[in-house]
Amino acid sequence: MVNVAILGFGTVGSGVAEVLDVNAEQVAAGAGKDIRLKYIVDIRDFPDSPYQKYMVKDFAVVEGDPDVQIVVETIGGAKIAYEFTKRALLAGKSVVTSNKELVATHGYELLQIAQEKGVSYLFEASVGGGIPIIMPISQCLAANKIDEIYGILNGTTNYILTEMFKNGLPFETALKQAQQNGYAEANPAADVEGHDACRKISILSSLCFGHHVYPDQVPTEGITAVTGDDVELAGRKGYKIKLLGRALTGGDGRVYAYVGPHLVPESNLIAGVEGVMNGIVVRGNAIGSVMFYGAGAGKLPTASAVVSDVIDAAKHIGTGSRMPWGAGGAEYVGDANTLETAWYVRAKGGAAAPQGAEQLGGVNGSEAWLMPKMSRSAAQALTEGMDVQSMFRVLE
Amino acid sequence: MVNVAILGFGTVGSGVAEVLDVNAEQVAAGAGKDIRLKYIVDIRDFPDSPYQKYMVKDFAVVEGDPDVQIVVETIGGAKIAYEFTKRALLAGKSVVTSNKELVATHGYELLQIAQEKGVSYLFEASVGGGIPIIMPISQCLAANKIDEIYGILNGTTNYILTEMFKNGLPFETALKQAQQNGYAEANPAADVEGHDACRKISILSSLCFGHHVYPDQVPTEGITAVTGDDVELAGRKGYKIKLLGRALTGGDGRVYAYVGPHLVPESNLIAGVEGVMNGIVVRGNAIGSVMFYGAGAGKLPTASAVVSDVIDAAKHIGTGSRMPWGAGGAEYVGDANTLETAWYVRAKGGAAAPQGAEQLGGVNGSEAWLMPKMSRSAAQALTEGMDVQSMFRVLE
């Protein structure tokens, strides 16, 4: 028998309670032992919740109960969640989380504490919602030297871009529609400015390349600069525009990670990842490319990932589930702006074509080109003097 | 330090030796200990191999060496591989394999022996080549009740169907091209008749639904009945033809598994799985649908999966890596022919449309229709008297 406490009874926390309840048989079979919800910690009252009997307001109750072996942290943010996670680990409890901000900013420190205490700190649900990605990378691809990882890591922006492409909506209308459907927050900045994707590619980079990559080491552009004109011009040549987080190793052994809009050829399977779905591609030296696809958010998919980690933690009580990930530092991370890729550029009409560029055509008084592989600064130099409206990388 | 012996120095076996060698650093980091190749067992001579020093001809050397903790079986078939696997497990060694025939026909028995001896029997590479699928299902989706699994499980037939679709080749020409490119055997029956996909869906069904499903419980059709006319008529309505292995639970709790050609709408991501690639979709009650995509065969991708299992076995020496999968039996498996799906039917011209069917159009003197959801026998009854040329299921 393993006892679990959930911190934070929001969307994910209540989903975890529900999955532990409804799928108790599968969970017990997977863990090889019964797993029982003992506490839900939240300062709010939930008088009508069927889980009322588990509710406590004070984390100290969980911290001081030696029968609680696993703590599920679904509070979010990097303040109170950080404090409670540290205290839980130091009290010898494994912690499972969906909190990408906390993992991206304090993952190394928390993993270190977990290792010292012989417990697990697991975060499958922090990237890709329910999609199995953290364990497949750390275990199934362990025989590989990973060269690159990239993907559609944010469902909200992918929904907006999909609506712009399929239904010709302008960005603002697509965003409003996403908000009406509950896919975007009232303040959509974390999604549309790329911060959410930035945290996720930080976590994936750290996992794939072995040293903590921090969000402030990842140059990030969102999708607010993507217009209907860009979507249309790219579409004419068989490209979709997708917001990708991407990280790869350079010849110098450093990691180059960034987030930004990309033109993706329709022949790439990831171009078919539509709406709120996520898709992540990993390239290893033995396996070649593999892709993982599924719902990147949502109550039950995310809870599914959290509970799979609960099962893993339950199986490894006494030893902890090992996750290799070393300290970060400026020396491990290169400047992503020096990465050479092909570029898409759109400028107000009448400009001469950039040298070596292929014309994509014009719309609404602007014209676009595809420029061959070069760094960002080279692309900027080549388009100097043009009235540039948009400039995005092109995925090969 | 963990010592490994490889049985069978063919494509996969030599790939395993190469990955253990080239990626030794990643492998040791993943396992938390050094993993050393000690023997390669093959009755053939390989005087020019860089791995010459590991070669022995007699399996008894491995069996009798207590320092060998992990045996990699890449012999293939279910005769000598079966005998050696059993002997290795009984000698207290973990066994890792890519041998789908052996797992599909004797998996339950071998898993039982492994459990009794406290060792692992692992077979990530038996399905989907290098794609992580066995561990993600057994661990990452453990919080789910799985409702359905289906996928493109055979790269050879997918290559042939892709060439028929993209380049309008007839089946025979596409097959010849696959043989010339090394994607198909001189005797292509195991691929084109669907036997390979049948073994793989047997393994996946057993894993997803908890009881061994044997290949002879899985009605299997290959792609030899798929013609260029079918590919063209389906394509006109936005469908691709794909060979799918599929298994789902019925309302009666039984498993319904089968292999056959399907019309897949282009809006389904799996329609974009082209050439020799594989794609597998799993549907769970919490996670919704997830897809796994990658190279379904090939020396290094398959070796990557084998070596990830070697790492897993090395981490669990002394306990064994648990895999839940019970005994099979007729009572667990329903008749897949009773499953209701939409149908595609093509008949020689001039026939009246089957009741309720939607006309797809005609080509080369035959006409095709889409029929609504019904069982195979209902579909056959409805087309009685027609000169039926092809009849395939349609994926929703």
Image: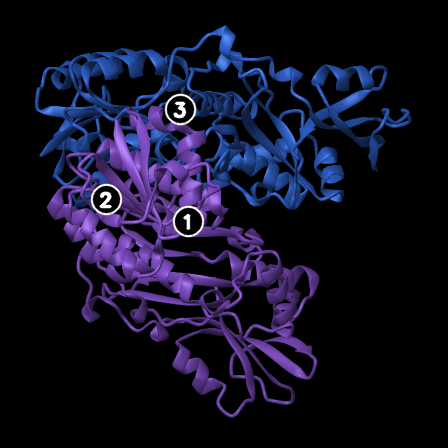
Chain colours: A blue, B purple
Check disc 2 and report the residue beneath it.
Answer: B61
Q: Looking at the image, is mark 2 or mark 3 nearer the viewer?
A: 2
**Labels 2 and 3 in the same subunit:** yes
Q: Secondary structure at mark 2?
A: helix
Q: Secondary structure at mark 3?
A: helix
Chain on which label 3 sits: B
Using the rendered view, name the quadrant where residue A369 is placed: top right
**Labels 3 and 1 in the same subunit:** yes
Check disc 3 and report the residue beneath it.
Answer: B25
Q: Position of residue B372 (x, y in %)?
A: 48, 73
Q: Which amino acid type is shown beneath numbered disc 2?
A: Val
Earlier along the polypeptide chain: callout 1 or callout 2?
Answer: 1
Q: Is residue B344 left or right of residue A306?
A: right
Earlier along the polypeptide chain: callout 2 or callout 3?
Answer: 3
Q: Looking at the image, is mark 3 or mark 1 nearer the viewer?
A: 1
Q: Marks 1 and 3: in contact by CB < 8 Å?
A: no
Check disc 1 and report the residue beneath it.
Answer: B45
Q: Residues within 10 Å of mark 2 (few under 14, many from 20)?
A: few
Using the rendered view, name the quadrant where residue A74 is placed: top left
- Please, is residue A290 above or below residue B163 in the view? above
Chain on which label 1 sits: B
Q: Is residue A171 left or right of residue B150?
A: right
Cα distance in 3D space between marks 1 and 2: 17 Å
